[in-house]
Structures are given as C-alpha cells and as structure tokens.
Amino acid sequence: MRNVFSFLLIVCITIGCAAPELMESTGFRTTNYADASESDPLPGWVLSELKKYPVETFLFEIGKSRGTDKVAFENALAEARNRIATRILRKVQSIILPNDSVQQEMVREHYSAVMEHYCLESQKLPALQLGGLGERNLSVDAARTDQYTYALVYIKRDELKNLYAKQEQKLHREINGILRHAQNAENALEIEAAVDIYLQTYPLYEALKEAEIIQIGAEHTPNFSDALTRLENSAKNTTGGSVLIKSHRQVIKRVKELDSKVIVSLTDIMSAIKSQLTTQKIIALSGKVQLELLTYKHDGLICHFSRDFSNAIQKQFGWHFVHRTRGFKRKIFNENKKGQGERYRLSGSCWENGDEITIRKTLRDLHTGEFLASSVVSFLNSQLRPPLVLTPPNYTAFSKVRKPFKHPYSDPDSRSTARLARQPVGSLEVEIWTDKGRDPVYYVKGETMKVFGRVNQPVYLRLLYILADRKYTLLQNNYYIDSSRVNSDIEIGEYVCAPPFGAEIMVVAARTEKFPPIETYEENGYFFLVNQDPESAARNFRGMQRPSDHNKQPQPDFQYNEAQVVVVTMEK
C-alpha cells in the first residue's frame, strides 16, 4: 500500500504540476511588466498601457477573463483585486519569514490572522480587500474585440499608505475608547463586564494589524530590517493614546488574568473559544462558513489534532460550516456575486512556547474583508487529559529535510532584493493542488487523494518525493508535458494513503529542456537518490549547482521553476 501511495502521488502530480509557486499566476506573470519577454502571454497593447503606471509610483495588477461582456469584466476585476492583495501579503511575508529568531517568531504569531497563515505558501485565497483602488477595463478603453477582457486595478503607493495611515489612527481612537470603558468597569469591580468589553477590541486589533502591513506592503522597496522593527514594535506596544493597556498582546494577557478559566480538556478549549466569539456578538451568521483546518505556527502543517478540533468546533456552533472549496476548478472570489459560495471564513493557528499552547481563531467576512470576531486561548498542555499532540512524529527530521526546498521569499516588485537559493528562471509557471487544496493538506490511512495541476508552457518534469522516513525517491525524470495540455486544469490521478505516516514533501522541478542524468538505486520498486544529504539532493534533483553569488551568474538558456506540496499522513 505504501508503494501505491508514494508512486501514484508522484505519477499523478507529474502531468500537471510542474514548476513554480507563483500563487499570483493565472497563466501570465504579474511583476516587472515593462520588462516582459515574448513568452509573457500579456499582449503588447496591454503592456503598452502599463507603461503609464511606473512600478516605483503605482501598485497595480491585471485580471484576465474570457469574454467581453460585463460579467467578464467583473471576473477579471475580481482576479486583479485578489492579485493585488496577494502582492501586499507576499511582500510582508518576505520580511517576516526568512529567518528564525525570537523576535520574528513573535511577529509571525502576532500577524498570523492578518497574513491568512501565510496564504502564499498554502496558495489560499486572501480575504484582504484593499480600499481606494482605481479600475479600468483595458479592453473597452482600447476598443478591443479580442476573446479576453483585461481589467486593471491600480493606486499610487503613497495614496495607499496615506489611506491606511488614517485608518490606523481611526482604529487607535476606537480601541482606546473601548479600553477606557473596560478599565472603568475594572475600577468598579465589574470584572465579568470588563472582560466582555476587552474582548470587543479583538477584531479591531486585527484590522489595525492589517492597516500596518498594508502600509509596508505598499512600499516599492522597503528596508526589510526597518520594516521588521516597525512590525515588532507594533506587536509589543501599539501607540496612539495614553491608556494603561495599549497592545493586543497586553490586552490578551489582561483578559487571561481576569478570566482564568481552568482548561484540562478539548471541551474546555471549545467552551473558551465559543465564549470569546459569542461575547463579540457573533451568534447567528446568514451564510456559509468556510472552516479551515488548524495550522501549526507558520510551518505549512496541519496540527495533528486538527480534525478532532474541527469536529468539536462544528458541534459548538450552529453555523452552516463547509470545508474549503475542493476540486480542480480554480475559484476567485468576485465581490459582485455575493449570493454565491461561502460568506465567512473561520481559520486558526496553533502556537507553542514551552508547555504553553496558544490557539488563535479568527472569523472574517469574505465579502467585505471585515474581521468580525477573534479569540485567543492559552493553556498548559501538561494539564490536558490527554495532552495534545501538535506535530507528526517526524517533525524535527522533516524540518531539516524541508529547508533546501522551501519557497523563495523575495520582493515581487524589485529584482535587486536578495533572494534565497532557488529562483525561477524565465516565465515558466506551474500550479499543483489536491482534492483537499494546497499546503497544508493531510490524509488519513485509507483515504484517497486526487491531484490536479496546471502549467503555462511545454516542460520536462523531475519529481521527488521525500518520505516520512527521510528517504528521497525519484518518481519521474524528464516527463514531458506537451502543448496540448498547457494552460488547462487537469485531474491527474488518485491514490490511497498508507503507512508509514508523518510529514512528507513532494517537490516538482520543471524546465524547458531535459534534465541531466541523476544517480539513483532501485529498491522495492522505488528509485532512491544515491546522495541523501538534503542540500546535495536538492542540487542534484534540480540538475543545477547553487552558485556562491548567483547575481553574477549568467542566466541559463532554459526556463526553470519548482513547486511543492507538503502532505501530512496519519493513521487515524
């Protein structure tokens, strides 16, 4: 059964999964439009229009939709809005993710709800709705009658920063007013009322965090060190008024001091979460609630107890829960079609500091982007009966193996920004996903996983699957995807989950010419890489050496990119 799972996983993924992790892509590149090459699908007349919006001054994105009617424009506009939100999040992600430090870990947790648990790593649809954007139907403006409609959304970077600086000030005033009210209740010894009032600030703090990151993401070339310091200072102490408690972290601490519930079971955790959310006047929701699985920190993994946790959430609330939309038809939220699909999103993450575990849950309106409610519950895992298992048994080994294959976090607006080891070459793009979405996904013994993919040009694929026991298997080498399957959403195949279990990685490399030979040995139907060192395996797998200073290296003649999916397999 194990062979069935691993081999089919890779074989399935080969057909459509080849190349990049450009979550922004729908078949064309979205950065450096002025320098677009002939391989970029954006037509020349669109590129000519974009010269009016220099990237140093403007933040902009293009959406594309088949058709020329009003609906096509609305769909293209929705795509462009989602792309520009992703652009903001990606830039901030590039600031807070690359290094591991105590300060950055604190910043990551503080902004985790706003960052959609790093939507670009998991390729989720961001709920961020930017205000102040200008809109153009380029096809209408240019009197085009092509089969596609191109929509442009744009805003001057300084205008966006000023808009959200004012929003930040407004939120400061509103939060401080509530905090004064809560402190008055404390002074009157109305402790229960004080807790309820403090909780009213939680969604406002999330909106405040979003205003902070938008201002940074709007900058063309932010100083990464200064930006991280700004985020760190905001997480520690929010300025804006002379009140005793200023930051969200301080408010959370005060709520815990005033309302120290004893938590010894999953039921107690659910009760605390429900109490906090309903106190924020979130009781009846008039639409479907998209329920996201609980993720572990920022590692792109599903918490090991996430399924039980989700089941308990559904029992606690009488909402119409649905799991994230599955299948291979990609979906972009169109705010002009508010009666369709999910209205809300309930997502969450789990963080640990020694024995203390913190679970954050956030409820958001997908139509407006508004934060409706938020809960933060902390407890000592050693007091639970039984204690929660947060990560798969091979988590430590998995983290070491995964490092050479992590996504590159780079500034999408600047070629001068230093990047990590792997870089895309050219405009080669690939998307891969399963019937449970993209990272993070999990499968339980006996479950069937379907795999889907999409590429934007003919490519050769090399597929590596890293098993839970840290063995590297080469499952496909120089698998060719021809032009007949380019730019199509393809259902690739399905397979069954079998032991051993743990965190595993599927990595797909793609390039426009064949890969050089790679040394393997066969055992029990697998082709294992001879060199099992992660760094060496990564370089051999890609068929290219990592230069000491890649900025001085000439670009290769071929185009290249990678994609990966993290799969957590469980026995039950």
Image: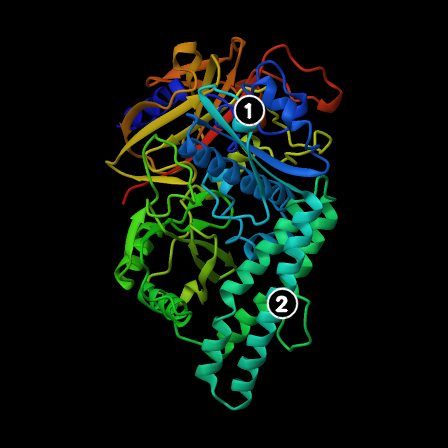
Nearer mark to the viewer, of 2 and 1: 2
Q: Is residue 425 visible?
A: no
| Kind of residue at badge 2 | His
Quadrant in the picture for residue 421: top right
Question: Looking at the image, is mark 2 or mark 1 earlier in the sequence?
Answer: 2
Q: Is residue 445 left or right of residue 537?
A: left
Towards the viewer: 221 or 53: 53
Towards the viewer: 140 or 19: 140
Tell me the residue at 68%/38% (across/down): 58
Q: Name the residue under label 2.
A: 172
* Rendered-image quadrant of the C terminus: top left
Tell me the residue at 63%/10% (across/down): 557
Q: Return the x and y of residue 430 as percentages of the image width and height.
A: 48, 24
Tell me the residue at 35%/43% (across/down): 324
* Rendered-image quadrant of the N terminus: top left
Q: For the view shown, which residue lies furthest in the front direction?
A: 143
User: Taking 213 as reference, is 8 above or below it?
Assistant: above
Q: Return the x and y of residue 489 as percentages of the image width and height.
A: 37, 24
User: Taking 29 as reference, is 102 above or below it?
Assistant: below
Q: Return the x and y of residue 549 as percentages of the image width and height.
A: 74, 24
Q: Residue 518 carries which label?
A: none
User: Taking 347 as reference, is 280 above or below it?
Assistant: below
Mark 2 closeness class: few <14, some 14–19, many ≥20 residues within 10 Å: some
| Kind of residue at badge 1 | Ala
User: Taking 42 as reference, is 137 above or below it?
Assistant: below
Q: Mark 1 points at which residue?
A: 538
Q: In this view, does 438 lie to the left or right of 81?
A: left
SS under mark 2: helix
Q: Return the x and y of residue 409 as percentages of the image width and height.
A: 61, 36
Mark 1 closeness class: few <14, some 14–19, many ≥20 residues within 10 Å: many
Separation (CA) of disc 2 from disc 1 = 47 Å
SS under mark 1: helix
